Image: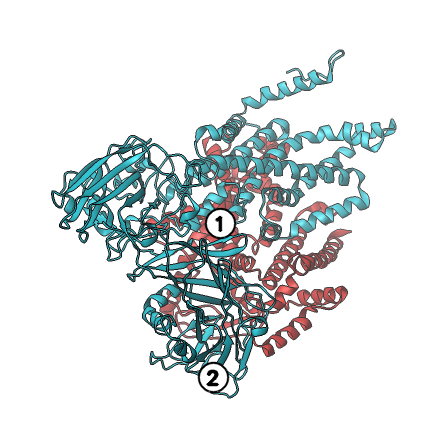
Amino acid sequence: MGLRGFILRRVIYSFILILIVICINFIIFMKMPGDPTDFLMAAWSKESPEQRQEHERALKELWGIGDPLEVQLTKYLRNLLTFSFGIEISGRRPISEVLAQKIPYTVLLLGLSTILSIIIGIIWGLFVIKKRGGLFDSFSVITALILNSLPTFWLGLILLWIFVGTLGWLPGARAFPVEWAIPTVGWPKPYTTVTSYSSNTLTVIFSISANDAWELIWGYVRHLILPLATLTIFSYGGWLLLTRATMLETVTEDYVVTARAKGLKENSILYKHALKNASLPIITSAALSFGFILSGAIITETVFSYPGIGGWIWTAINIRDYTVLMAVFYLISLCVIIANIVADILYGIIDPRIKYG
Amino acid sequence: MSMKAKGRGETKFSFTFRRFADFLKVFVRNKRALLGLSLILFFLFIALAAPLLTPYNSLGEDPNVKGALAGKRAAPSWLRNLPSWLGGNPDLTENMDLSGKNAGAPKTLEEGGVWNSSVVHASSSVSVNIGYDTNVGYPYHVEGFPITYENGSLAINYQRTVGEAPGETKVYIFQEFDYPFSGLPARLKGNLEILVDGNTKPIEMPLENWYIIQVDAPREKGKPRPFSGDFSVSVDDYEGINVAVANITFSDWLVASDKNWWNWLNANWEKMKWIVNEGSLINKTYSDVRNATFPLMYEDTGDVYPYYCFMNDTRIADPNFEDENNCPDIYYPRSWFSAQTTLAVPSIAGDSRIVVANASGFNVDDYISIGSGDAREINRIKNVGQDYIDLYTNITMDHSEGEIVVNHKLMLYQNLTVDKARFYLVMKVVVTENKLYQIRIDIPTSAGSMQIYGLYRGIFRNPTGTTVESKNAISNVLGRNYISIDATGSGILLVPLKIRLFFGFSGQNFENTVKLFPPDYKVGISSPPSGFYVDAYGEIENNKGGVYVCYAKAGLISGWILSKNSPSDPGSIITVEDVVALRNMITSRPGKYIYGLEISFIDDFVMDQNVTVKVWVDDFGLFMEGTSFGILGTDQLGRDLFAQLLYGTRTSLYVGVLVAFLSVAIGLVVGLFAGFVGGAADQLLMRVNDLMLVLPGLPLMIILVAVLGARIENLIILLGLLGWNGFARVVRSQVLSLKERPFVEAAKAAGAGTSHIIFRHILPNVMSLVYISLASSVPGAITAEAALSWLGFSDPTRMSWGRMLHEVFVAGATKNWWWIIPPGLAISLVAMSFILLGYALDEVLNPKLRMRR
C-alpha cells in the first residue's frame, strides 16, 4: 500500500467528510427552528422596496431560497466549495471581505500562541524528564495541571484586572491603538498607504519609512501581549504533560535502559533515542492543534475585545447573523479537516510502520 | 494483597467488595489520589451543606426580605479592616439594621425604638399632646376590610382655641442613633406612615382634576396600521345623578420618548390650559357653544413648522424639516390636530357645531368623524389647503340611571402607515360634589383600529397648579379601565401640615438640621390598604390649597422616602448622592446622629373656631444599606456573593458528573459496539466520530443552546452528546486489542454468543478505562458549562460560577477582585481535583504508567 496509497485514501475520505460537513451546515443554518431563511429575507424588510427586491433576488440566486430542497442543497454545496458566502446580515459587507480582514488577526494570535505553547511545553517537558521524580517534576506537573484547568476567561479577566485595571501597563482591548486611522478594510497603519483588495484576496501594498516600522510593530505587539499570554499560559500545560507522558513511556522502555547501560550520555539518550520515538504523538497533536486555530479563541477574543474570528462569531450569534455563522463554521471545519490530512501525512512519513508497511 | 480469584463459597458481592477494598488500599497511598479525593469531598460537602452555611437562597437573596440585602456591588466586610495598601478601604460602611451588629439604626416603635419629641409652640393657645395610641396603627382599619390594628402608633394631638391664628407650630419626633462609620451608606431606606384627621372646611366645588392617559397601540411588525381610534369616555357617579365633568381633550400627538411627554406637558401646560380653559364650554351660553372654535395646540406659538416629521411615530420638532417634502425617508409626515368636546351640565341637546381648525391644513384624504353609530358624521376635506372642517353633530346626553354617557368619537384617517401609535388623552375632570367618582375609559378594539395597549400614568393636578403623579391612578376592574376620584372628603384641613424628615447631629438645633423633603417633595403611597386609596397619591404640604382635598379625612401614607430626582417614580429611594448636604454631614465624622420627622402645623387662617388636628405616626424607621457586606460582598442587585458561590458548587458538580456519565456511557456503548462488531458498523461509527471532531465545539454548543434554550437539562444533554468522542476511540482501540486475546478466542470456541463475550469478558477489562474516563471527563464538562454561562447562556434559575463571572461583566465590576477571583478559583480547584483523581486512578489501575523511579 505504501505512503501514496495511504495519503490518497485520506484525501478522498476527507473530501467526502467536507461534503458531509457542508450538509450538516446546511441543516443547521438553513433548516433550524427559528427559520433562518426567513430571517435572511426579513433583514432587508426595512429598506425601500427596490433595494428589498434587489436583495431578495440576490439571495434567491445565491442560496436558492424558496426553491425545492435539492436545488437549495446543490446551490449551498456550490457556494461553500467555492467560498462565495454572500453578505453579512448586519453590516452588509461581503463576508469574504470581512473574513480577509479578521482572519489575519486570529491567525496571528492563535498561531503565535500555539507555537509558543508547543515550544514552551516541549522544552519544559524535556527538562522535567531530565530531572524526573524530584521536586521540579511535581511542581511542573502540578502547575501545568492547575493552569490548564483554569477557565480561560477567568485567566483573561485576572490578567485584565492586574495589567490593565491596576497597573495600566497594557491596553485592554482591540488589536491596535485607537489613534491609528482605521480604514474599513485592510490593516491599519500609521502612515499613508495604498491598499487594494478584491473580494477574495487581500493585498496590501504599502510603503513604510524606517522609523515607522518599529512603531507599527510595537503597536500591534502591545495589544497582543495579554491575549497571547492568556492563551499560552492556558495551553502550554497540555503540551508539557503530553511530552512528559510520552517520554516517560519511552524512557522506561528496555532499549533506553540498554543504552544507559552501554554508557551513552544522558542527553544523547534523551534526544537521539527517546525523543525520536516519543515524538510521534506530539507531532501529530501539534499538526492537529493548528487546525483548531480558527475555532479556538472565542472566549479569549471576547474577553479582550480582539477583532478576530472568535469575537466575530460571538457577535454574530448574538444578533443571529446566520450568513456569517455559516461561513465561519464551514471554514473552521475545513481547517480542521485539512489539519487532519496534514497530520495524517506527517504520521505516514514519520512512522516507518506505515511508510514501509 | 489478596488478589486471589473468587474462591469457593464466596459470594459475588463479597468478592467485589474485597477487590474494591484492595483497590482502595493502593489508591489511598497515592498522594494525588488523596488530594483529589479530599478536594472532591470538600466540594461535595459544600454543595450539600450550602443551605446550612448561608441563610440566603441560591441567588444570594434573603427569602424574607424583598430587595437588596445591602448596597449594590458592596465590598466584603473584612476589606474595611485591611490596610489601604492591601486594598482596604476604611470608608466602607455596613448595613445598619436592627439585628445586625450595628444595631444603632433608628428603629420603629414595634421594634423597640424610643422616639423622643420636642415641640416648638407658636403660642400659648396651642396645645400639643404626644402619646401612644394603641387603637390606631397601620394597616389602618378601613370600613369593609377586616383588618386589625397593629401595635399602635404615636399620636400627636394638636389643639387650639378660638382666636388669633398663632402661626406655625413645629413638632419634632426623632431618635438618636450611633453611626460608627466615616463613609456614606449606599442607600437609605425608610418607612413612614402618617394618618391625619382634623377639622376641615368644605371643599369648594367645582374642583379640577387633570388626567393624561397614555394609550399605546401595539406594533404589528411590518404591517401598516391605519391611524384611527375610537374612544369613549364616560363618567359614572357612584351615588347620584348629578355630576361633573367637563372638558375632555383628545390629542394624538406623540412625544419622542417615554419621559419626554411629561416634560413637554410641563413646558406647554399653559398652552394646554389655555386650550382647554379658554376653549371650554362650561359657563358659556348655548350660542357660544354653537359657534365655538377650538384652536389647535401650537396655533399661536409662532411655530414655523406646521409639519412635524415623525420617526417611528415619535414626534420630533426638528427645525430642519419644514414640511413633509423635506422629511427624510424614515420620517412620516403628519399633521395633527386636537379637537375638543365638552360635556356641560345642563345638557346641550340638539344641534351643536364644533369647528376643528388645523392651521397647517389637512390632506385630501383626511376626514373627521364625530358621533357614533348612525349619528356618525363624516366630513371630508373638500379642498386641499382647506383649514377647517365643519362638524355637525348631535351631542346627546343620556340621563339614564345614575349615568351620563357621552360617546365621543374622533377619528382621523390619513393615508399613512405607522408602526406604532401612541395617544394621549388629556382630560380635565371637574368635580362638582363631594362624592366618589369613577371615570370609565373604553377603548373598544376592532380590527384595524387602535387597541388599548396599556393605560397608565394619570396625572393629577390640584387647583394650586402643582402636580402629583399617580401611577396607579388607572385601575382595571373586570376588563374596564377606571380612574377613581375620591371627593368624599369633608374638606380642606383647617390646619394644613407640612411634613419633613431630617437628619442632624445629636444635640444640634433643630432648625439647622438637614431637611429632606424641601417644599416640592411628595410623599407617595406604595401599597394602600384598601380600594379607596387606589389613586391615593396625596400631598401633604403647606400650600394654599392645604392638604389635598380628597384625602383630608383620612390621608394614609406609607411607603418609601422619596428621591427628588425622580418625581415620576414616587416609589424610589433616596440615594445619598442626591442629597449633598446629607452627604456632607454624614461623612464628616462617625458619631451620634438624630433622625426624625418634623411636622409643622401651619395654623394661620382660622380664627372663628377651635381647631383640632390629629396626626398618627407609625412604623417610622430607617435602614441604612452599607457599602460592604458579608464575606464576599454583593453583586449589582445587592445579592450576597458568598451564597452564590456556595450554591454554584451544586450546579457545577451536578452538571459535571452527569455530563461525564452521559458521555462515558455513550462512548462506551459506541466503542464496544464498533470495536467488537467491526466491519461496516465500525466504519460508520468512526466516521461519525470524525465528523464530530471536525465540527467546532464551542460555537456549535453556543448556537444549539441559543436555539434550544438555556435550561440546565439541555446543557447537560448537549455537553454529553458532544463529548463522547475521545472515550469511544479509546474503548474501541482497547476492545480491538482485547478481541485478539486468547481468552476471547477460547470463549468463542466454547460457543459463547456476542453479548456474553462483550459483557462477561471484554467489559470488565474495559471498566478501569471507564472509571478513569469518568473522572477525567468531569473537568471538561465543568469548564464548558462555566464558559457557556460566562457567555450568557446559563439557566436563569440556577446560579453557577460561570454565571457569577458573567454578572461581573454585566455589572461592569472588573475592579472588584473579591468578586472575580473566588468563582474562577473554585472552578479550577474542582476541575483540578477531578483531574488528580483521574490521574491517580490511571496510575493505580494501569500499572504501565507507574513510574519507574
- Element class at badge 1: helix
Residue at the spot of label 1: A231
For disc 2, the chain is B
At a point 64% along the width and 56% down the height, the residue shown is A333
Residue B780: percent from the left, percent from the top? Answer: 57, 41
Amino acid type, mark 2: Asn
Can residue B587 be seen in the rendering of this structure?
A: no
How would you rate the neighbour count of disc 2 (Cα within 10 Å): few for under 14, some for 14-19, many for 20 or more?
few
How would you rate the neighbour count of disc 1 (Cα within 10 Å): few for under 14, some for 14-19, many for 20 or more?
many
Q: Left of B806 or right of it: where is B592?
A: left
Q: Which mark is residue B306?
A: none
Amino acid type, mark 1: Leu
Q: Which chain is red?
A: A
Question: Image quadrant for the C terminus of chain B?
Answer: top right
Along the line of sight, the residue nearer the viewer: B477 or B587: B477
Up the image or down, B765 lies above or below B569; here it is: above
Q: Left of B17 or right of it: where is A222?
A: left
- Element class at badge 2: helix
Along the line of sight, the residue nearer the viewer: B779 or A314: A314
Q: Left of B267 or right of it: where is A59?
A: right
Residue at the spot of label 2: B325
Q: The cyan chain is which one?
A: B
Q: Distance between the residues labelled 2 and 1?
A: 57 Å
Residue A312: percent from the left, percent from the top? Answer: 53, 60
Question: Image quadrant for the N terminus of chain B?
Answer: top right
